[in-house]
Image: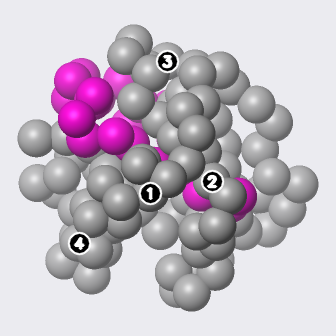
Amino acid sequence: MTHVVTESCIGCKYTDCVAVCPVDCFHEGPNFLVIDPEVCIDCGVCVAECPVEAIFDEKDVAPEQADFVQINLRLTRQWPLITAAREPMPEAAAWAGKKDKRGELVEMA
């Protein structure tokens, strides 16, 4: 099992989760973070740190968000590792409450 970043992260990219990760499993794209399932040790410390509740244990991902398991895996191979917290995106607060953001995911780094 691993943890998965889901749709709520899109447009926000808070990095509180990165700061507490003991194994450096997060990768950063233009407007989203992903977790490398091959590195994640399933400790769960990142879950409580996410201010938009975007991180779930793989078994707890909602059915309508299930494609994010594969999105995390695929984008981990394309995006660079992030190992330290950074400022969230400038419009993070406005994006935090938005729904149906999947179409806003920018995959090109």
> Helix, strand or loop at disc 4?
loop
Q: CA distance from mark 1 to mark 2?
A: 8 Å
Which residue is at the front of the view, 84 or 65?
Answer: 84
Extent of the magenta region: 30-51
| Residue 81 versus residue 95 in the image, above or below | above
> Helix, strand or loop at disc 2?
loop
User: N-terminal of the two: label 4 or label 1?
Assistant: 4
Closer to the camera: disc 4 or disc 2? 2
Q: Which mark is residue 66?
A: 4
Q: Are marks 1 and 2 in contact (CB under 8 Å)?
A: yes
On the image, numbered disc 2 is attached to which residue?
29
Q: Are marks 3 and 2 in contact (CB under 8 Å)?
A: no
Closer to the camera: disc 1 or disc 3? 1
The chief SS type of the magenta part is loop
- Left or right: residue 47 versus residue 49 is left
Which residue is at the front of the view, 35 or 9?
Answer: 35
Q: CA distance from mark 4 to mark 1?
A: 15 Å
- Position of the C terminus, as image quadrant, is bottom right
The amino acid at mark 3 is Val
The amino acid at mark 4 is Ala
Q: Residue furthest right?
A: 90
On the image, numbered disc 3 is attached to which residue?
20
Describe the colour scheme in one phrase: one colour
User: N-terminal of the two: label 1 or label 2?
Assistant: 2
| Residue 1 versus residue 25 in the image, above or below | below
